[in-house]
Image: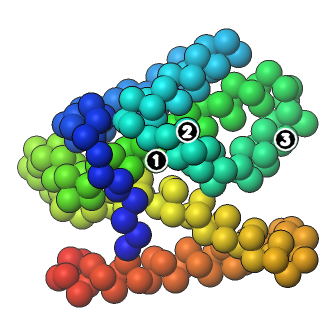
Amino acid sequence: MIQLYRPGASVVHRAPTGSKLAVLTVAALLLSLVPQTAGSIGVVLLAVSALYRVAGFPMRVLGSELWRIRWLVLVLGVALAVFFSPLIAWINTGRVVALLLLASLLTLTTRMADLLDALHRMLRPLRRLGVDADAVAMTLSLTITMIPVVAGFAEHVRDAHRARGVRPGVRAVIPLLVLALRHADDVSDALVARGIG
């Protein structure tokens, strides 16, 4: 499994994992449910960018995270602009970018073990309803972690196409899918080796 955590002593690193998860959840709900304007999305993106600085990361880390999701931003933004309007494209693409950057910041400032523990504690009351807290916690943590991992795979595929002088098109999805499935197999083998699942 790829470890995304970057050690640090910032306020964001020291914040309780449960609090960081709560902030991510609330941000996702607010961005999804509350109507946004072009100006408010700009403020949200600036605030998320500022959180990277508060976490003690240089701007190149934020730039690297943005670079990883550039194709998603481009495809989503262009599709929304063509089928709806540039304003809707800006607002909705901004929402997605803000959430992905927050999820990346969570994985950069939180150890996987801490993330699993926090998710497990939050889900423990659901055991009365027959929910397997361990399995759900592992699934959620892997999902959050996979966002930047798959974005990294997409970057590798694009770089490989560029190195060969091939124009990446729809066929670029196939090697990306192969890499993602291979990574999933590796993660599965690692979990089985540790007696999980």
| Quadrant where the image shows the N terminus | bottom left
Question: Label 3's element?
Answer: helix
Question: Which residue matches tag 3?
Answer: 78
Q: Which residue is mark 1?
A: 104
Inspect this view and state whether residue 36 appears.
no
178 in relation to 173, above or below: below
Where residue 4 sits, quadrant-wise, is: bottom left
Q: Look at the numbered discs 1 and 3 and tell me whether their residues touch, using CB distance below 8 Å.
A: no
Q: Amino acid at mark 1?
A: Ser
Residue 191: x percent and y percent?
27, 79
Q: Tag 2 or tag 3, which sits nearer the N-term?
A: 2
Check disc 2 and report its element: helix, strand or loop.
Answer: helix
N-term mark: 2 or 1:
2
Q: Residue at x 62, y 20 (%)?
A: 41
Q: Amino acid at mark 2?
A: Met
Looking at the rendered image, the disc whose residue lies closer to the viewer, 1 or 3, is: 1
Q: Look at the numbered discs 2 and 1 and tell me whether their residues touch, using CB distance below 8 Å.
A: no
Disc 3 versus disc 2: distance between alpha carbons? 26 Å
Label 1, label 3: how many angstroms apart (C-alpha)?
A: 23 Å
> Does 182 appear above or below 73?
below
Q: Nearer the viewer, residue 174 or 131?
A: 174
Left/right placement of residue 114 relative to residue 65 reads left
Residue 130 pos. (x, y %): 15, 56
Quadrant position of residue 105: top left
**Labels 1 and 3: the sequence-earlier one:** 3
The image shows residue 138 at horizontal and vertical percentages of 28, 62
Q: Which residue type carries mark 3?
A: Val
